[in-house]
Image (spheres, helix red, strand yellow):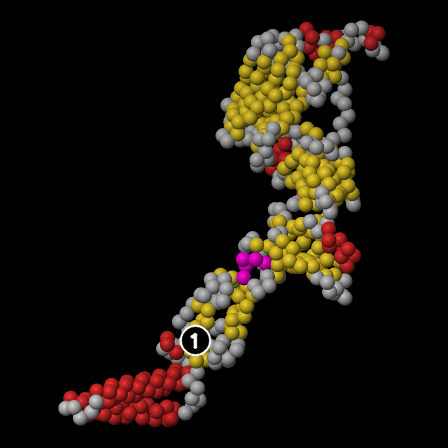
């Protein structure tokens, strides 16, 4: 007679010792067999979208206590549930509930279940924890009478070829699983690529005149962001008079003398206009001549001060004689050769600005793939360290001049508003899709393990049991890969920590449980 806890669960292989004809050799005493034998525990694993339940318990017997070792994993984090209430529901002839208000150890609830009447029941486990409420239905179970339980002995435990990997190991490592799905994907090519500025996306800011950089502005460091029209630097131009200070002093003196003459002439003209000896127009001309003479004094003094400032390398010069350098577009400072107070020559490059609103992804398309250019249906960017590929906006161009050294042509895609972690000049991978989509079983790339040259995945067949499945790889997209092999849709594959499971498979020792079953 064989007792089961429901479809798809471990059978409790039991043999009923009814007589000597069923056994060979000396007839054992039934009472000794019953006293020494213990039936195999029932082991169940269930998943919902929120949690994983792994439970072990002895067969249920009327009037006897069976301890349920309930392991609960939060699938949002794949960590053990550390707080909450676990309840075992028996629904049938007499509905009963058995519960504990806290786990005995993180993730493990020990619930004592004592059925009061034999028969068929529906079994369920309900979890009520902070941020996680879930229910797992375990199907039909049979509660044995004491007489039936006494007549049952344990058969030999069936040989299990699965890989043991305990919950205590899963919870302490970077471990996660996900169900295999059926998805549509197209064939693709993976190309070496580089991130470059877009066309017109970089500019050199040069000096229009020779002079000295003002030192009263904050320096623009490499990597800093600048907005269009923002001031980068100011240049105090050289005087243009070389070392001829006496000539400048003479010009100042002459300009001051001209001012005195102009003032005297204006006063004379005003007196004559008052008595009617000169027309009013002459008074206006005299005033304008005086103002012009004063302006020449100001200019001559400024030239002299500018020469002195240039010769000493001191002072910041008047604001009205400075040349202001502004950024022609928004972006970052990629290069800077500007040192406050340093002299610069006309045409010298001080800054290189690179725009980051859009960038180009420039890949190298092999010569052999040129015939498939017309089949391109999309592309994505794969960056080391990124959790998922980045979809690319549009194809800009495919080159038609072959590089004789690499035998490739450039293929350029545009990416708008790139992630701040991307850098101009960064080496990346460009995946281009070159065919219509096909449908197949799909798993994350991280689920694939290279096992001696054979790609494999590890399937979780129970809470602490895994199987190695060899697969063949197909199309890839968005961090996923299509596979063919003995993996069905809905089976849970290890997507984080698969190498740990592989090491467990190679270990000659079977791990012992860190909890009581």
Q: Secondary structure at mark 1?
A: strand
Q: Is the residue marked by circle 1 packed among few (<14), some (14-19), or many (20+) residues within 10 Å?
A: some
Residue 455 lies, with reference to residue 375, above or below; the image says: above
Q: Which quadrant would residue 22 be assigned to in this image?
A: top right
Residue 62 lies, with reference to residue 449, above or below; the image says: above
- The spot of residue 389 in percent (x, y) is 63, 48
* Residue 358 among those drawn in magenta: yes
Residue placed at 40% from the left, 71% from the top?
216
Q: Which quadrant would residue 44 be assigned to in this image?
A: top right
What secondary structure is the magenta-colored segment mainly? Answer: loop
Residue 10 lies, with reference to residue 200, above or below; the image says: above
Residue placed at 48% from the left, 67% from the top?
327
Q: Which residue in the protein does label 1 denote?
A: 323
Query: For this rendering, which residue is in front, 463 or 133?
Result: 133
Residue 264 lies, with reference to residue 232, above or below; the image says: below
Magenta range is 355-359
Query: For this rendering, which residue is in front, 410 or 478?
Result: 410
């Amino acid at each position: 007679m064989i007792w089961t806890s429901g479809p798809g669960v471990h059978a409790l292989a039991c043999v009923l010792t009814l007589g000597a004809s069923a056994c060979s050799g000396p007839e054992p005493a039934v009472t000794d067999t019953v006293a020494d034998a213990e039936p195999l525990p029932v082991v169940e694993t269930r998943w919902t979208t929120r949690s994983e339940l792994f439970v072990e318990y002895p067969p249920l017997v009327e009037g006897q206590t069976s301890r349920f070792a309930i392991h609960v994993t939060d699938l949002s984090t794949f960590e053990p549930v550390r707080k909450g209430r676990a309840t075992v529901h028996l629904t049938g002839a007499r509905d009963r509930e058995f519960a504990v208000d806290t786990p005995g150890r993180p993730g493990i609830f020990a619930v004592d279940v004592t059925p009061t009447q034999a028969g068929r029941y529906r079994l369920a486990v309900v979890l009520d924890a902070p941020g996680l409420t879930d229910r797992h239905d375990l199907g039909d179970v049979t509660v044995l009478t004491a007489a039936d339980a006494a007549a049952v002995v344990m058969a030999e435990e069936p040989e299990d070829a699965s890989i043991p990997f305990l919950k205590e190991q899963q919870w302490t490592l970077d471990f996660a699983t996900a169900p295999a799905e059926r998805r549509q994907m197209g064939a693709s090519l993976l190309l070496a690529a580089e991130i470059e500025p877009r066309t017109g996306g970089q500019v050199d800011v040069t000096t229009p005149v020779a002079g000295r950089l003002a030192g009263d502005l904050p320096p623009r460091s490499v990597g800093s962001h600048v907005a269009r029209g923002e001031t980068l630097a100011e240049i105090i131009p050289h005087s243009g008079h070389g070392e001829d200070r006496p000539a400048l002093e003479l010009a100042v003196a002459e300009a001051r003398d001209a001012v005195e003459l102009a003032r005297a002439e204006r006063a004379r003209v005003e007196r004559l206009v008052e008595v009617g000896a000169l027309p009013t127009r002459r008074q206006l001309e005299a005033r304008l001549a005086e103002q012009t003479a004063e302006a020449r004094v100001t200019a001559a003094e400024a030239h002299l001060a500018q020469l002195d400032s240039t010769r000493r390398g001191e002072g910041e010069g008047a604001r009205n004689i400075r040349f202001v350098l502004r950024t022609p577009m928004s972006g970052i400072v990629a290069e800077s050769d500007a040192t406050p107070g340093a002299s610069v020559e006309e045409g010298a490059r001080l800054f290189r600005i690179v725009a980051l609103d859009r960038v180009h992804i420039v890949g190298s398309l092999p010569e052999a793939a040129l015939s498939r250019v017309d089949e391109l249906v999309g592309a994505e960017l794969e960056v080391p360290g990124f959790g998922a590929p980045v979809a690319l906006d549009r194809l800009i161009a495919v080159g038609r001049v072959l590089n004789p050294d690499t035998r490739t042509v450039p293929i350029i895609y545009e990416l708008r508003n790139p992630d701040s972690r991307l850098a101009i000049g960064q080496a990346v991978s460009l995946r281009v899709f070159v065919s219509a989509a096909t449908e197949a079983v799909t798993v994350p790339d991280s689920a694939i393990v290279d096992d001696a040259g054979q790609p494999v995945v590890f399937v979780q067949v129970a809470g602490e049991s895994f199987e190695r499945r060899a697969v063949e790889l197909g199309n890839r997209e968005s961090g996923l890969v299509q596979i063919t092999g003995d993996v069905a849709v809905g089976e849970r594959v290890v997507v984080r920590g698969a190498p740990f499971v592989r090491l467990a498979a190679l270990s000659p020792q079977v791990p012992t449980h860190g909890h009581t079953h």
